[in-house]
Amino acid sequence: MAPTPRPSPPESDRSGLPRPTNHRSVSRRALGLGALAVPGLLSLAGCGPDVGNGGPNDIRIVDYYNTPADDVAINGTFSQCAEELGLTFSREKVPGDQLIAKVLQMGSSRTLPDLLMLDNPNVQQVAASGALAPLGQYGITTEGFTDPVADLGMYDGTLYGIAPTVNTIALFYDAAALEEAGVAPPTTWDELHDAAAALTTPTRYGLAFSAIASYEGTWQFLPFMWTNGGDETDLDGDGVIGASRFWSDLVREGLVSRSVVNWGQGDVIDQFKAGNVAMVVNGPWNIAGLEADTPDLDWDVVTIPVPEAGTDPVAPLGGEVWTVPITGDEEKQKKAAALLKAFVAPENQLYMAGERSTIPGDAAAAEQFAGEHPELSTFVDQVSTARSRTAQLGPDWPRTAKAIYTANQRVLVDDTDPAEAFDEAARTVDASRTAS
Amino acid sequence: MTTTATQPVARAAGPGSAARRRARRGDLLVRYAFIAPAALYMIAFFGYPILKNVVMSFQDYDFATFFNGKAPFVGLANYTATFSDPIFLRALGNTGLFTIGSIIGQFVIGMALALYFRKKFPLSGFLRSLLLLPWLLPMIVSAAVWRWILEQDNGALNRFLEGVGLISDPIPWLVSSSTALVAVIIVNIWLGIPFNVVLLYSGLQSIPDELYEAGQLDGATGWKSFWHITLPMLRPVVSVVLLLGVIYTIKVLDLIIGLTGGGPANATQTLATRSYEMSFIEFDFGQGAALSNILILIALAFSLVYLRANARAAKNG
């Protein structure tokens, strides 16, 4: 499963920028730079040069798998499947935060690839725009998938995308620290609170999660909100407000650093690695990094604690889904769909899940996977009861997600009462829904 | 009579003036031909996007538009929505504070450093090139590094301030809505200093030494020579620095996105970040365009002030 050889990039231009030789040219360059400063929309005008050779059997693929482990697993699986089908492929890897801008640009210039990977919350928007082919017509189904995993690629009752592997979040803890403090891994909110209190020292916080002003902040809040009976269609309900109050109490008591409003999930796991935090909410994609960077750290994972014993844990489903954009070339769409069908076969799911520390989408494969990878079994459990973010709101989800993280930031930073903050969040969402 | 009299004249002048006219026309064509590439470039890469942005702001331009091309015109709806957005006023105020704070800081420190480097001393060249460093770093790298420095619990800045006894409790630089904007301004000042130093320094080089010698004879030294010789001579450069600074700063986006993402709780939201958020997070490109048009108008107002001041200066000079 060696990655396909890629043409080596052209010799980097060593000449680079002209070196300023005297101060005058420096200042002129400065003026030039100033003049070049144009509104950000211009960036949309730039077109990507990486278009494959475009043969009838060459499938163009766009995704954001840039880390070495992800890249090798994805590339290897595609290589094998393409070879069996007599196809070739060319992959273009886009930085994660630029994928949507790239998709929009490709959509308007009619250069969508034959296979497109999307982060699952974005599928709704792209499918709603009519850019994606229903997968059912190519014989791709979600048979064997649990409903929430199937929902990830569903828009308006039709399947547009399929996720070979999924992920979710759970609670990582420093086993040695817990033992030293004499606390057991928490299972309820009360236990989580008490454990965080016992683990907090002058140089260490008991717990950390991400409450950053981006979708990550909302994603991490969802397990607390959902298990507390909160719902994205009822932002000013008691379930949501109660979860926000639980977060804010932890921060106000100093068990969680106020800095969480500026920490992404990567920052949170870095704090855990550095020993600044004893328990963190995070995902399985960090396991490889934890093992590589901190081999001495004795960590373990449990499902995210629930408000009261006996409540089912509900975490959000993450993961990327693959879609077949409508390019107008029906023949090629068929070939792309055939490649996708092979790509998401259960044995490939198992391979990719193992390489990338994620969970197979197929329920039976996930069960087998849990047996082979006990360190990931908590995540397999969590995935079996997890929920898709967009199942209820569809394309309205991004606005709601923003309203949620903004309200939480107001609660955590300005000590705004959760009821007040989420009351306003609910009103903002309603206003934007009636406006559009 | 008159016709017969003028005709020969006209005939006599005819060939000559026609040739001259032809030559002049050819000359004009050549001139336009030289301008054409630049003009086409400007129209394609500056004119079109701005025009498109203006048109977009009157359309219901959403995610699907990119695929089906449908963007119905909605009149002023995007502008009324923008003005009634509760975050708009906050973003407008933040943009003002951010711009004014950054410009004052950058200019004062930049001027002080430029004056300092006028003196000849060992290592001055090396130190000057060191000053350029913030300018050479990609903005997003600077933002990432400053996020570590400004971290509340383990950040270098708080550790330093505590170490020297200036503060007893760590300052929540980026995580409190009252300090986040200040922190972002400080980082932007750091980023803008090289630009100011380089332009002001090169302006200082062009002031002839004789002026200072003459000033010295009249008793103008130190602050006096600065106020009466340096500053007036530097005026054209100063106005360029300030104007470009304002236009530059008013639309800073990546630094704020990298440091705080517009948070916490919208405390560092500016018109630029809000426009980005509207377009690429909420996928309301029409309203995003409306916001950035407002931004362009503000920048344009500054340019007009500058152009008028320049025209007046040219007339007086």
Image (cartoon, coloured by chain):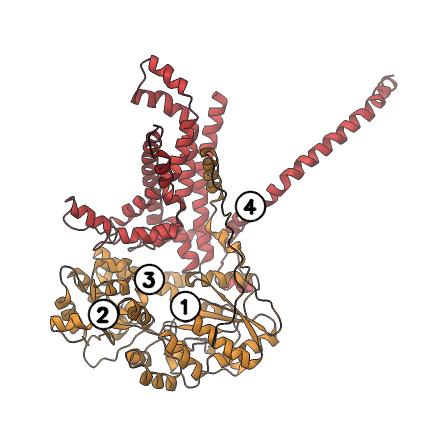
Chain colours: A orange, B red
Residue at image position (47%, 55%) is: B286
Residue A355 pos. (x, y %): 38, 75
- Residue A233 in sight: no
Residue A117 pos. (x, y %): 47, 70
The answer to whether marks 4 and 3 mark residues whose Cβ atoms lie closer than 8 Å is no
Residue B187 pos. (x, y %): 31, 46
Label 2 residue SS? loop
- Residue type at mark 2 is Leu
Q: CA distance from mark 1 to mark 3?
A: 35 Å
Q: In this view of the protein, which residue sits in the foreground, A423 or B127?
A: B127
User: Label 3: how many residues lie within 10 Å, few (<14), some (14-19) or many (20+)?
Assistant: many
* Residue under numbered circle 1: A68
Residue at image position (61%, 44%) is: B40
* Residue under numbered circle 2: A297
The answer to whether marks 2 and 1 mark residues whose Cβ atoms lie closer than 8 Å is no
- First in sequence: mark 2 or mark 1? 1
Q: CA distance from mark 2 to mark 1?
A: 23 Å
* Residue under numbered circle 4: B47
Q: CA distance from mark 4 to mark 3?
A: 36 Å
Label 3 residue SS? helix
Label 4 residue SS? helix
- Residue type at mark 4 is Gly
* Residue under numbered circle 3: A403
Look at the picture and state if B156 lies above or below A127: above
- Residue type at mark 3 is Ala
